Image (tube, coloured by chain):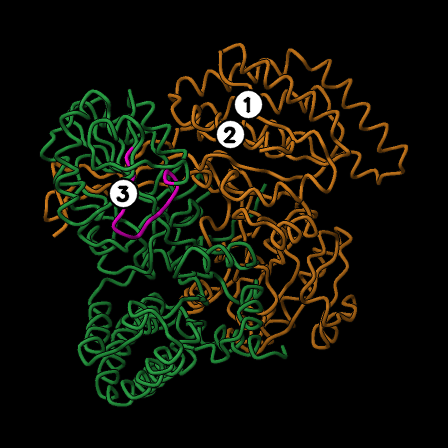
Chain colours: A orange, B green
Amino acid sequence: MGSYMEMLAKLAKEASREAAKLSTDAKNSGLLAVADELVAQQGLILEENRKDVEAAQAKGTKQSLVDRLALTEKRIADMADGLRQIAALDDPIGEVLRMKVRPNGLRVGQKRVPLGVVGIIYESRPNVTADAFGLCFKTGNAAILRGGSDAINSNLAIVRAVKAGLRKVRLSQDLILLVEDTGREVVNEMMKMHGWIDVLIPRGGAGLIANVVENSTVPVIETGTGNCHIYVDASADISMAADIVENAKTQRMGVCNACESLVVHSGIIDEALPRIVRKLKAHGVEIRGDERAQAVSPKVIPASEEDWGTEYLDAVISVKTVDSIDEAIGHINRYNTGHSESIITKDYGNALKFQDEIDAAAVYVNASTRFTDGFEFGFGAEIGISTQKLHARGPMGLEALTTTKYIIFGNGQIRK
Amino acid sequence: MGSYMEMLAKLAKEASREAAKLSTDAKNSGLLAVADELVAQQGLILEENRKDVEAAQAKGTKQSLVDRLALTEKRIADMADGLRQIAALDDPIGEVLRMKVRPNGLRVGQKRVPLGVVGIIYESRPNVTADAFGLCFKTGNAAILRGGSDAINSNLAIVRAVKAGLRKVRLSQDLILLVEDTGREVVNEMMKMHGWIDVLIPRGGAGLIANVVENSTVPVIETGTGNCHIYVDASADISMAADIVENAKTQRMGVCNACESLVVHSGIIDEALPRIVRKLKAHGVEIRGDERAQAVSPKVIPASEEDWGTEYLDAVISVKTVDSIDEAIGHINRYNTGHSESIITKDYGNALKFQDEIDAAAVYVNASTRFTDGFEFGFGAEIGISTQKLHARGPMGLEALTTTKYIIFGNGQIRK
């Protein structure tokens, strides 16, 4: 164990053994102490954050990215409140699922336990630092955090405050470890720490996620990209369809559960599309459609093949016309990213068929895709939205940061 | 989509969409038809198997490996019975977990669905071919199987019989796809089919598994290696300890849940070790221990540091002496592979402490490690034993081959 990353991983592993033994009370006290410390140290944190913001501005960074980076008293208070909310959640650790007695008398149960060491690789939002720590710690894990180089001063200041809070309640400083070297080499090494880091969660853009999936030997939970569709079935309530499409596209444009593509049944398009277009145009949304959509509405401009697979994260939507629900399902399963898809319909059979056959983390009937979110689903927290199928799929709350082990109580059983 | 592997993956993806829609009745009919066909075609299968066996013998392959490769009428009947047993199991697909109504009226549930395309990379046991197909198919998945080159003729014959069975009940031939090119290049390509293959399960030796973990961009479920310990606590029932160690070490030597290392408390070693040694020696087991163990029994030969981390899969066991349960837990957590560990104790606190603090898929009190097995745990099937923490940990039954999706029923909800 020589390198910097190996040293971090070893410290984290040791801390994780301690974290796994902590009572819920001890963890909640830690979360509250850290929340208080973030507020107490807000002057220091804001000062360090200013350095990052100024450096970003000097580099000519886009204003929207600078906004993500910038902290305020309000944002620090929100970070602290986030930790207090996590303290208020039920602790999933220790729950025993399905304990059964086997014919030979062995009692076999499955117990929820921490994963161990959770690695998180993220970009420029410094609030992720406190948030990710809180979720990992509540579930008895140690966290190794690798934030973007743009936010390094902010992250260092936040981590100092977290460690100070932990110290106040006599918990290990190593429960949160920030990778202070923001170079590429260290992150490459982090992705190869199989056996030391138990899971890697990339949070950020498609490029970051693809890089981690491609190069990690540590198991990865993929999060994020959402090329989400809304299919307006022949039997849809058109007014409901227009409201839902408007909401899913425009309520917040740059998020993964926003609607990026509209699929409309040809039997209803003449009536439905103009109403939807009117609503979207009021928000300045550009509408790119196939020929039939263009024929229905002059505001629809031509879509190319590339549009069907594009997550715009912007004021753009594509429109595809289909002649059947099967064609709609085929189109969506071909181009979606496995995130969130919705059907607007009054037809019982089509509602069930869509939910059965669409391959995605969240499949809706008559609702906006914007609800795919740990808070909206009632988990009280969210570490990200998994678009993969193993371990966790869809919004991930505290349970996604746990695993199980079988616990077996015997009284001398041997295998025949 | 040009290459051979891409073509296979595309066929499998299409077949998986169909498989996901099949009723339990349809799947069970398919399993029974395939079972019958394996028996009907046993002459052809045995003939092809003979080619593999003769080729292996000509190459000077070890007799134990030739035995694994060789099929008999009995083994083919067992393969068929295995499929009939899978038909008799409950179908996990479609079960809806935890459906709840949110304050806005949305009904959010989690539904168990197939993974999609399951890739299995295995070595020379041809019975895995039928078994893996059965488990994947029962759970609505398509299977891409890549067996060892040594068994290629046997595997081709078995797959032909499976396809013939599927044809009889008018199911897609592509539900089972054998990678007929057994070269390295194709398996490397298979590991890069992210997005096409949903999970890869390597079944075989440590080298095969490490290669897949290292190189796959497809999510992997690691199975297999077990450096399993039994800790004989100061308060153990010595007669129970001796029986359990004997069973865990010798009932079957070459399996992953066999005991490879004994950890003994110094307070009981004088009394316990000679009795355990006597039992193990009767089975010809070589015993390698630390100095204290050697001092207690002249039959114990010196262990090296390497022994603590070795999975022998043979008639060898290591013995480590400790002065406390904490030392025992520290030793086991350092050297184990996260498979199965057992404590023999009469002490309530130590039993719970061991179960809480040992980091492994299965943690026993007063029972043999040999019970870590899908059948012994009551799952009725087993696709392997996961030693990783994501998705599935411990023996994997049918549920390990499923994922979930959120299904959301609304009546016009939009996000505020």
- Residue at far front of view: B298
Q: Whole-percent x and y of residue A101? A: 14, 44
Q: Nearer the viewer, residue A367 or A308?
A: A308
Q: Which residue is mark 1?
A: A174
Looking at the image, residue B140 sits to the left or right of residue B282; the answer is right
**Residue drawn at 68 percent across, 21 percent down:** A74
Q: Is residue B308 magenta?
A: yes
Residue receiving disc 3: B317
Looking at the image, residue A16 lies above or below residue A122: above
For the residues carrying marks 3 and 1, which lies nearer the camera in this image? Answer: 3
Dots 2, 1 in contact, CB < 8 A: yes
Residue range (magenta) = B307-319
What is the x, y in percent for residue B74? Answer: 17, 77
Q: Residues within 10 Å of mark 1 (few under 14, many from 20)?
A: many
Q: Chain of mark 1?
A: A
Alpha carbon separation for disc pair 3 and 2 = 34 Å
